[in-house]
Image (cartoon, helix red, strand yellow):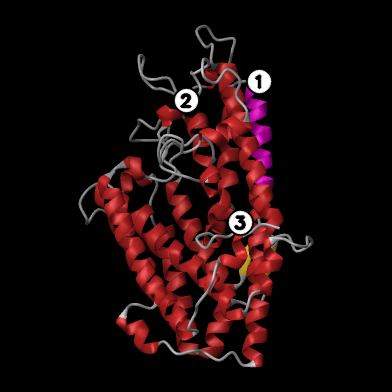
Amino acid sequence: MKVRFLVAGFWVYMAACALAGCRERAAEKARPAAFTPELAALASKALTTYADLAFAGYADSAEQAKKLLSAVDALSEAPSQVSLAAARRAWIAARKPYPQTEVFRFYDGPIDRVETLVNTWPIDESYVEASLEGQQPGILENTKDYPALTADLLASLNLKQGETSISTGYHVIEFLLWGRDTRADGPGDRPYTDFSPKQAGNALAQRRGVYLHLACELLLRELEEVRDDWDPRRTGNYRERFLRLPVRDALALVVKGMGSLSGPELSGERLSVPYETKDQENEHSCFSDTTHSDVALDALGVENVCLGRYTRVDGSVVSGPSLCEVIGARDRALGERLKAELSRSVAAAGSIPAPFDQAILGTDEAPGRRAIWATIQALQRQTDTLSDVAALFDLRVSLASLRKRP
């Protein structure tokens, strides 16, 4: 884990420098950009599109989490290979919209208040369920300290013993559905009988189902809260405050979210760390072997914001004036460069083969590692360009006005 923190710290530092304009190239180009009435009007429209994309993405995420909750309840009520497979499909479907919303993180917005309950990783699965006889019992087995499981209890235990002591969120649900990934040729393979109280020697089956239900219930609760904070039909919420910010301040938040996801999070923590360590424990969705999809959807989320469009789960498209249009109105070449780099990043991320835990192995000339390295480089380039965008508009922001909930 030491390597992970060293690499992650490096990328946090580099992205902070880039987005603050401390690189000499960006500093030289930094000029206070006067927003003409026309440019300010376009930027305001683009910020409204941004808020619309956030609401749609979180609405889709909440709706898919609700379907996941129904699927896991069906599994508990009638455990079978069929109901387990259906619950796993529901989890994968629930993950499709959420990574595309991660671009709305990293600036003390609504998701940042609850993200540790939603998507934190990597997790110490033994904190949830012990793997070896004689091992300290996990939450699931510890009926002495936790005789009755509740959503609030699971939330209170999250991160209680360190950064990997995760008790809820997407990846705990993933672990409960798939079990540990001990195979090179596929994901975890938890048997459906782990949820069947009728099976001999399976005293924890009912409690496991309760845990799974509560984790899904808590996930849905948090996602609905974030969705409501971006809802255009509500008043006094985060969306309203965000759209009342000065244009330059709001744009700074948008670019900070894009740059933080592109650089320290995706290029650094999620790709560079497993690339360097070749360690499955640094893989995002390791139990289901769907990390390649997470990476591709994260990259797509950044492009969505720049282009001002998001394709919803039902196939409908939310779109409007975009950040790229605002950039292009000020510096056409820079706007086109960013669009091209985003397109290359999405293509590179989509080329990473599954399973990710095998793609990180081998020599640097292995196809999987070449694809991952190409994605890292593409993300680095677009992060550099986003720093140029920040310099172009001389972006500065105070987060104090957004921290207090109504």
Residue type indicated by callout 1: Ala
Residue 37: percent from the left, percent from the top? 66, 92
Residue drawn at (54%, 49%), measured in percent from left and top? Answer: 115
- Stretch of the chain drawn in magenta: 62-77
Q: Which mark is residue 348?
A: none
CA neighbours of label 1 inside 10 A, class few (<14), some (14 to 19), many (20+): some
CA neighbours of label 2 inside 10 A, class few (<14), some (14 to 19), many (20+): some
**Which residue appears farthest toward the top when viewing the image?**
200
Left or right of 80 on screen, residue 228: right
User: Of marks 2 and 1, which one's residue comes earlier in the chain?
Assistant: 1
Q: Which mark is residue 110?
A: 3
The tally of labels here is 3
User: Is the residue 274 above or below the residue 245 in the image?
Assistant: above
Q: Which residue is mark 2?
A: 190
Q: Quadrant of residue 263?
A: bottom left
User: Of marks 2 and 3, which one's residue comes earlier in the chain?
Assistant: 3
Residue 183: percent from the left, percent from the top? 35, 31
**The stretch drawn in magenta includes residue 340:** no
**Which residue appears farthest toward the left when viewing the image?**
363
In which quadrant is the N terminus drawn? top left
Badges 1 and 3: C-beta atoms under 8 Å apart? no
